[in-house]
Amino acid sequence: MEEIDLQNEIVYLRRMTVEDLQAISDIALDTRIWTYTAFHLQSLSDIKEYIKKALEQFKKGSEYPFVIIERQTGKIVGCTRFYNIDFTHKRLAIGYTWINPCILADSNEYKL
């Protein structure tokens, strides 16, 4: 798959890499993120497995995982992905999306 970068004035999405482990683990252990999700990242081991599976699916061509970067700070604030990618029928789903609730809440420009 080709590289995909998505952005607006608030966030920038780029492909997740294994090098994002520390930045993701710095923000992913806030339990409020996982209240209404089907999966829960509760440890560094969970985060490593989450990234590993996402990158495996990327290699297979069935998912495209992104990190969400706040443009103002350049810091990773969450993750999302395209999944169930179907090249034959030119369709995909968007999900696995989460943002740390504390990261953007302090900004005067926007609130979560």
Image (cartoon, helix red, strand yellow):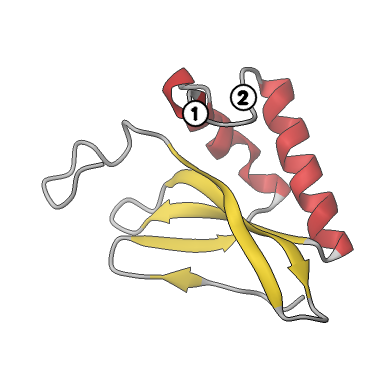
Query: Tag on residue 36?
Result: 1
Q: CA distance from mark 2 to mark 1?
A: 9 Å
Residue sitting at x 47%, y 31%: 27
Residue 16, picture quadrant: bottom right
Q: What residue type is disc 2 on?
A: His
Residue sitting at x 41%, y 70%: 7
Outermost residue toward the right in this view: 60
Give percent across and percent down for residue 109.
14, 52
Residue sitting at x 48%, y 19%: 31
The residue at which mark 2 appears reads as: 40
Q: Quick one: label 1, few (<14), some, or many (20+) residues within 10 Å? A: few
Give percent across and percent down for residue 61.
83, 66
Picture layout, residue 82 above or below residue 39: below
SS type, badge 2:
loop
Q: Quadrant of the N terminus?
A: bottom right
Give percent across and percent down for residue 38.
63, 31
Residue sitting at x 77%, y 80%: 89
